[in-house]
Image (spheres, rainbow, N blue to C red):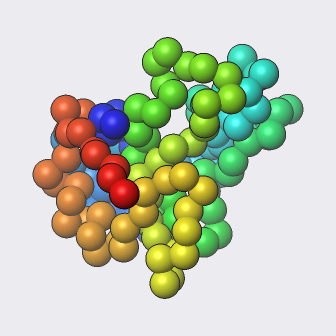
Amino acid sequence: MRILSGYFRNDQFAGARRTRLVMMPIGPDLGWCEVPDDRNYNRPVRIPYGASHERMKRDDRLYDACLVLDWNIAPRRRGRGSAIFFHLSRPGFTPTQGCVAVTAQTMARLLPLLSNRTVMKVVR
């Protein structure tokens, strides 16, 4: 999967500025639509939003630096997965819901090396 762009919490993860990726700040009204039948499925939305969505400004800080992977972006297929991100890990690396997660230290080290030409290969 290519890394397309990203989001960051300016108040929490200033290291996101040191990258060649397009990085947008996460504000309190940023969400990501999860509903396959919605016209904004697997797209950012402004919240409050009528359909189910994920709030990007999270209390657990997982999305303090959050990169969008090109899974089901173009073309978009309903029900094939939404919000597949490369983001920060929980303590103890507990499982994600289909994303890839690393420590904040690792993310800060990788960001300057990444661009929209970077390809992430996930293997088992």
Residue 66 visible in the snapshot: no
Q: Quadrant of the C terminus?
A: bottom left
Residue 25, position as x, y percentages in the image: 46, 47
Residue appearing at x 28%, y 74% in the figure:
105
Residue 29, position as x, y percentages in the image: 67, 44
Residue 104 visible in the snapshot: yes
As drawn, which residue projects farthest toward the front? 124
Residue appearing at x 43%, y 41% in the figure:
68
As drawn, which residue projects farthest toward the left? 113
Please, is residue 111 above or below residue 44 in the view? below
Residue appearing at x 24%, y 39% in the figure:
119
- Residue 100, located in which quarter of the rendered image? bottom left
**Count of numbered circles on the image:** 0
Residue 61, position as x, y percentages in the image: 54, 68
Please, is residue 48 above or below residue 73 in the view? below
Q: Quadrant of the N terminus?
A: top left
Please, is residue 73 above or below residue 12 in the view? above
As drawn, which residue projects farthest toward the bottom? 92
Residue appearing at x 37%, y 67% in the figure:
102
> Relative to residue 79, is residue 10 drawn left or right?
left
87 or 108: which is nearer to us? 87
As drawn, which residue projects farthest toward the right? 50
Residue 94, position as x, y percentages in the image: 54, 75
- Residue 65, located in which quarter of the rendered image? bottom left
Please, is residue 26 above or below residue 108 in the view? above
87 or 47: which is nearer to us? 87
